Image: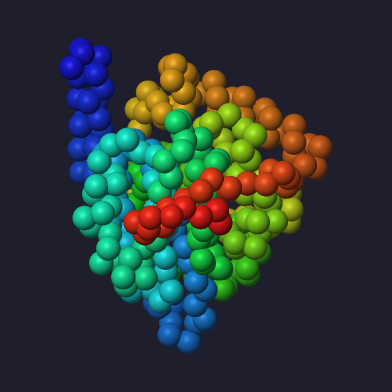
Amino acid sequence: MTQKTYAQRFERMLRDFRDQYFRNYKDEKLPDAIFDKALPKYSISFCTTCMNRFFHLKKTFLNNVENNKNYPNVEFVLLNYNSQDELHDWATKNLPPYIERGLVNYYHTTEPKSFHASKAKNLAHKVAKGEILCNLDGDNFTGKDFAFYINHRMQLNGIDSLLQFKKAPYWGTEGRVVLAKKYFIELGGYDEALEPTGHEDHDLMDRGKALGLRYENIQIENFLHYLSNTTVEKAVNVSEKEVNFYDLESKNRKQSKENIEKNILKANLSGWGETPLYKNFGKETLVY
């Protein structure tokens, strides 16, 4: 192990300890109205992708499933984007009981050699069955009964709602975007023409706002817990050479602004989410 690698692992250990035990979150009692049995229930899918970030996912994913399993018709989509760590072995051992109960669907591709956030997220959102989609980064914790809360807001505000869960200084949940699947498809998903990472979530939201979706920023801290990333980790898997996340983000921010100014609101006109996938440890791939 090189001195640089040791330093990065030590920083990861310190960050995880801080993130889980020293953040001063002000969690609150959720309103009883979200559990009203008379309230209609949308089907909801949480969409998570992973490439070589199992060190986060092993702490978050099943915690999130357990915290939302009581919501009727909830689905957790986990997309293994050719992760070269322990993810697939872990999934093989731990996910079958959740798959059998209809709580989890696990998809796996062996094709990508590097990570592309828009392409990975599009695959996860495309295969999702829910009427409502929530992007859930692998380093995020949903919090208890998050699905009930999402349903309540969508029922209250309308299916054309666009929800984002973020609050300073908890920047790690900025990608927690919720919208109806029909509008996700209308927008063409995440823009695959962007650089591999940075600003893709904001681009989707900005196009959604321009389309007429009603944006709401929700700041309930119960739902804002996450494990932070080092600067290196933010872009480590997107290229064989070292790249700076903030350079990529800046390029994407500029391109997104130009597209929206030209009223280009639908991305990927030639198609998206077409990588063949294995589902739930099956032996054949399908394009969804």
In terms of image quadrants, where is residue 66?
bottom left
Taking the image as shown, residue 207 lies to the left or right of residue 124, namely: right
Q: Position of residue 154 (x, y in %)?
A: 56, 68
Q: Position of residue 262 (x, y in %)?
A: 81, 37
Counting every numbered tag in the picture gives 0
Tell me if residue 230 comes above or below residue 163 in the rendering.
Answer: above
Q: Quadrant of the N terminus?
A: top left
Q: How is the image coloured?
A: rainbow
Q: In this view, which residue lies farthest toward the bottom?
A: 38
Residue located 27% across and 63% down the image = 96
Residue located 20% across and 25% down the image = 10
Residue located 47% across and 19% down the image = 243
In terms of image quadrants, where is residue 241?
top left
Q: Quadrant of the C terminus?
A: bottom right
Asked whether residue 60 appears in the rendered view, the answer is: yes
Tell me if residue 192 comes above or below residue 129 in the rendering.
Answer: above
Residue located 54% across and 65% down the image = 132
Q: Position of residue 253 (x, y in %)?
A: 63, 30
In terms of image quadrants, where is residue 163?
bottom right
Q: In this view, which residue lies farthest toward the right?
A: 262
Q: Position of residue 226 (x, y in %)?
A: 34, 45
Taking the image as shown, residue 241 lies to the left or right of residue 86, namely: right
Q: Nearer the viewer, residue 264 or 1?
A: 1
Q: In this view, which residue lies farthest toward the top?
A: 3
Asked whether residue 69 appears in the rendered view, the answer is: no
Q: Nearer the viewer, residue 213 or 241?
A: 241
Q: Nearer the viewer, residue 257 or 273?
A: 273
Q: Nearer the viewer, residue 199 or 225?
A: 199
